[in-house]
Image (spheres, grey):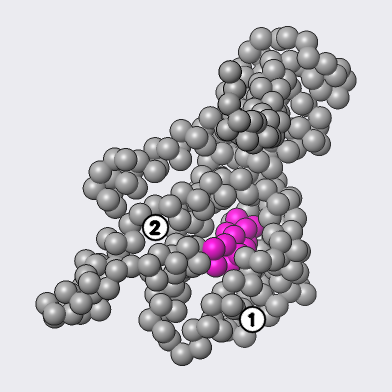
């Protein structure tokens, strides 16, 4: 029989089923149907949608583009965030003001910031090319060339989410024990030696957690691309999420977009698990 404690767990269990388990199972069922703009319904067509996914070059190209964008942006966010966290941790002048200033981009919605950055990157009216012109650099086609558009999305991602990395790493730095630093000072270790032999190893668990969290979020990038470039020019900045949106909500290929979503989900779970294991082996020296 169910005891009273099980009834306390029942609301959470029902919520979990409602918002996670049922949508997942329904998506799996839809992925085996031909539901599209011409025919709605859950008719069973076997694995045709999945065969189409593995033959879809555009999807795999968008996945490769997303992987490159995520790795570069998260690496830059970690480097800049760690540098800013170290600066504030060392009690630089105006540290409290800097903490608030660094968090402003993160507190603004991605859609709003993308609209602002779209104005900044405007080739004739935006301030980005005006600033470059002061240094004798010609106008850059930020949003009308493949390379420029990719760099533009990268800049926006780094600018908006570096504060998140800064916040996590600063919390980790504040919680570090003082004893290893006292021992390093007694041994005569300099600033760089103290960082590489004390600070960086002690921050390894925080580093792994921060990188994985940001990689998970970066793998879902869609709103910035939608507002800033709409995946263009052509498909130069089209990510997997944006491509799934095109197939599902623009072309209304519901069955096929469900199959795309599930393949994408499995790839992300496997990839992030492998990355987490590699980071553990590299930074901690063992596989968790």
- The numbered dot on residue 131 is 1
Secondary structure mostly seen in magenta is helix
Q: Is residue 212 above or below residue 58?
A: below
Quarter in which the C terminus is drawn: top left
Q: Which segment is the magenta one? A: 149-164
Q: Helix, strand, or loop for circle 1? A: helix
Residue 99 image position (x, y, % from top left): 54, 77
Compare marks 2 and 1 and give the one earlier in the sequence.
1
Quarter location, residue 203 = bottom left
- Up-down relation of residue 247 to residue 157 (above or below): above
Q: Is residue 204 above or below residue 126?
A: above
> Could you say which disc has been placed on residue 206 in the image?
2
**Residue 177, percent from left and from top:** 29, 69
Query: Is 154 inside the magenta-drawn segment?
Result: yes
Relative to 167, is 233 above or below? above
The quadrant the N terminus occupies is top right
Residue at horizontal 66 percent and vertical 14 percent from the top: 48
Seen from the viewer's position, the closer of residues 12 and 101 is 12
Mark 2 residue element:
helix
Rendered residue at 67%/48% (across/down): 222
Q: Nearer the viewer, residue 259 or 198?
A: 198
């Amino acid at each position: 029989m169910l005891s009273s404690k099980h009834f306390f767990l029942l609301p959470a269990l029902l919520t979990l089923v409602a918002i996670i388990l049922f949508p997942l199972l329904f998506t799996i069922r839809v992925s085996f149907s031909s539901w599209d703009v011409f025919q709605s319904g859950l008719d069973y067509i076997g694995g045709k949608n999945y065969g189409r996914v593995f033959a879809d070059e555009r999807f795999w190209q968008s996945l490769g583009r997303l992987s490159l964008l995520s790795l570069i942006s998260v690496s830059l966010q970690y480097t800049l965030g760690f540098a800013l966290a170290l600066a504030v941790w060392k009690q630089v002048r105006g540290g409290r003001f800097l903490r608030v200033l660094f968090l402003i981009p993160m507190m603004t919605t991605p859609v709003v910031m993308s609209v602002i950055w779209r104005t900044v990157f405007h080739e004739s009216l935006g301030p980005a090319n005006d600033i470059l012109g002061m240094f004798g650099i010609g106008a850059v086609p930020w949003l009308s060339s493949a390379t420029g558009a990719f760099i533009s999305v990268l800049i926006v991602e780094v600018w908006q989410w570096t504060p998140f990395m800064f916040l996590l790493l600063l919390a980790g730095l504040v919680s570090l024990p003082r004893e290893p630093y006292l021992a390093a000072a007694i041994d005569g270790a300099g600033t760089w030696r103290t960082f590489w032999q004390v600070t960086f190893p002690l921050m390894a668990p925080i580093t792994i957690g921060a990188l994985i969290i940001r990689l998970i979020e970066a793998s879902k990038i869609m709103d910035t691309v939608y507002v800033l470039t709409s995946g263009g020019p052509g498909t130069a900045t089209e990510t997997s999420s944006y491509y799934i949106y095109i197939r599902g909500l623009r072309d209304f290929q519901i069955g096929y977009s469900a199959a795309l979503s599930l393949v994408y989900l499995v790839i992300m779970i496997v990839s992030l698990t492998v990355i987490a294991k590699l980071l553990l082996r590299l930074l901690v020296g063992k596989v968790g």
